[in-house]
Image: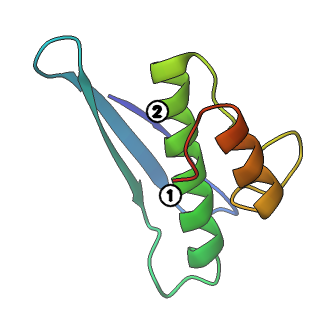
Amino acid sequence: MGSFGQRSGEPEDATFSITAVEGDASELHFRHHGLTPELECIEMCTRSWDNFIVSLRDYAEVGRGMPFGSRGMPFGSGEDNARRLREGGTTE
């Protein structure tokens, strides 16, 4: 179990656990406590966490992740998606 977080004096925690499942697979459980739909940053935070989780999966499966998008390109942009497809990845 891991955790981190506190921003702008507001208590926030992101917690995660990694559990072994059948064979050589693992399961990641992630939760960002305090991130609610009422917050102004909900859309940006959700997109960012989606990007980081996909990047972590790619890193675990193929040895290369892109936690900050592709070479400075915004994650999910046309350029980023094209690069991911060229390199044999997915755009999800």
Q: Which mark is residue 57?
A: 2
Q: Which residue carries the number 1 mark?
A: 12
Q: Nearer the viewer, residue 51 or 14?
A: 51
The residue sitting at 14% across, 12% down in the picture is: 23
Q: Dot 1: few (<14), some (14–19), or many (≥20) neighbours within 10 Å?
A: some
Residue 29 x %, y %: 29, 41
Q: At 59% from the left edge and 64% from the top edge, which residue is drawn? A: 47
- Label 1 – label 2 distance at C-alpha: 24 Å
Residue 71 is situated, as x and y percent measured from the top left of the image, at 87, 39
> Residue 26 falls in which quadrant of the image?
top left
Q: Which mark is residue 69?
A: none
Q: Is residue 6 left or right of residue 12?
A: right
Inspect this view and state whether residue 28 appears. yes
Kindly give the residue lying farthest to the top in the view shown: 24
Query: What's the amino acid at mark 2?
Result: Arg
Task: Classify residue 74 as left or right of residue 61.
Answer: right
Q: Amino acid at mark 1?
A: Glu
Residue at disc 1, secondary structure: loop
Label 2 neighbour load within 10 Å: few <14, some 14-19, many 20+? some
Q: Is residue 5 above or below residue 35?
A: above
Tell me which residue sits at (30%, 32%) in the image.
17
Q: The N terminus is located in which quarter?
A: top left
- Residue 19 % position (x, y): 21, 24
Q: Quadrant of residue 79?
A: bottom right
Q: Nearer the viewer, residue 66 or 87?
A: 87
Coordinates of residue 76 in the picture (x, y in percent): 69, 60
| Relative vertical location of residue 57 with respect to residue 35 in this rendering, above or below | above
